[in-house]
Image (spheres, grey):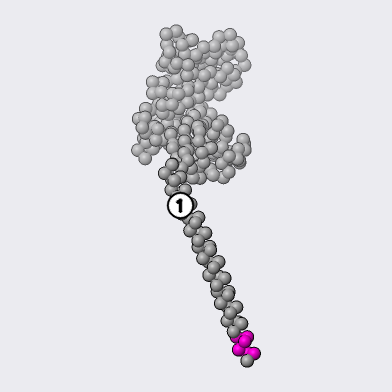
Amino acid sequence: MKLRSILISASLFLLAHGVSSVGTDGLSAFLMDGDSVTLHTNVETKQQEDIKWYINDTRIAQISGDLSFICTDVQCNKGTERFEDRLELDYKTGTLTIRDIRTTDSGLYELKIISIRNSSEKTFNVTVHGVPAAERDEMKRKSVKEGESVTLDPGVIKNPNDLMTWHFNDICIAEISEEPRMICTDVQCKDGDERFRDRLKLDHQTGSLTITNITITDSGLYKLQISSSRFSITRSFSVAVTGLSAGEIAGISTAAAVGVPLLMAVSVWVIYFYKRQVKRKDTRMQCSDQKSLH
């Protein structure tokens, strides 16, 4: 609960203060260490524009219109390795993705699109909050036993205009959006995976995903993607499902060893009692017949 309070407070702050000026997009969702974020250009390049990305006035990515020059991080600035190959640049749109984001990646990101006819600029105010490892693990790493239920909570305030999509092994298993209004789970979703067979529950207000009657085959990496026209955030959740412990298995075996013979003994006694009652009834009927003859 403490972690959730921190996440919600941070989300409210960003919603209130994220947009600081015209052309600046503040991320209105909580970013924590380990998340991935994609900053959208919302353009389709025609191989006529130069696209450049900066953080705090330092160039970190660039793609030329004819694709003759492409660079990210250290390739753009020798001696500067702050992102360590964690940047991905989409060649068609110029969209920038920062993987495994860290608090040191916080800052003002600036996008410049330069063409012969015109130029445009856009800035993104990205804030990454550090969360203690223990609290982060509590939220993003779940360990449960077979048959139990587990809830994966995004820990953010859901924006009505955002699309929230849950994936397991890169397969869409749940999706929720407001415009157009849509909500689906498991086989209802476009990929049609029937692994969970109506064991998924999606909270319409928070976007949290609950898996009921969980099985060992449900173990793995779950990813939540929160998307808007400006940016996309990907958060990963690790779920480990364990079978019954040796002690529990031994307990079940012991109960079975005691229960089966007991059940058999009860069954034999019931059969014996039933036959005895039938025999007594037959004897009484014979005696009654003999008396009537005399």
Q: Quadrant of the C terminus?
A: bottom right
Can you tell which quarter of the image residue 197 is in? Answer: top right
Q: Look at the image and tell me whether residue 226 can be seen.
A: no
Nearer the observer, 7 or 230? 7
State how many labels appear.
1
Q: Quadrant of the N terminus?
A: top left
40 in magenta = no
List x then y, in percent, for residue 27.
45, 28
- Residue at the bottom extreme, as displayed: 294
Q: Judge from the rendering whether residue 165 lies leftward or rightward of residue 77; answer left or right.
A: right
Residue 280 visible in the picture:
yes
Q: Which residues are magenta?
A: 288-293
Residue at the spot of label 1: 255
Q: Which image quarter: residue 13?
A: top left
Establish if 274 lies above or below 291.
Answer: above
Image location of residue 169, percent across then percent down: 55, 31
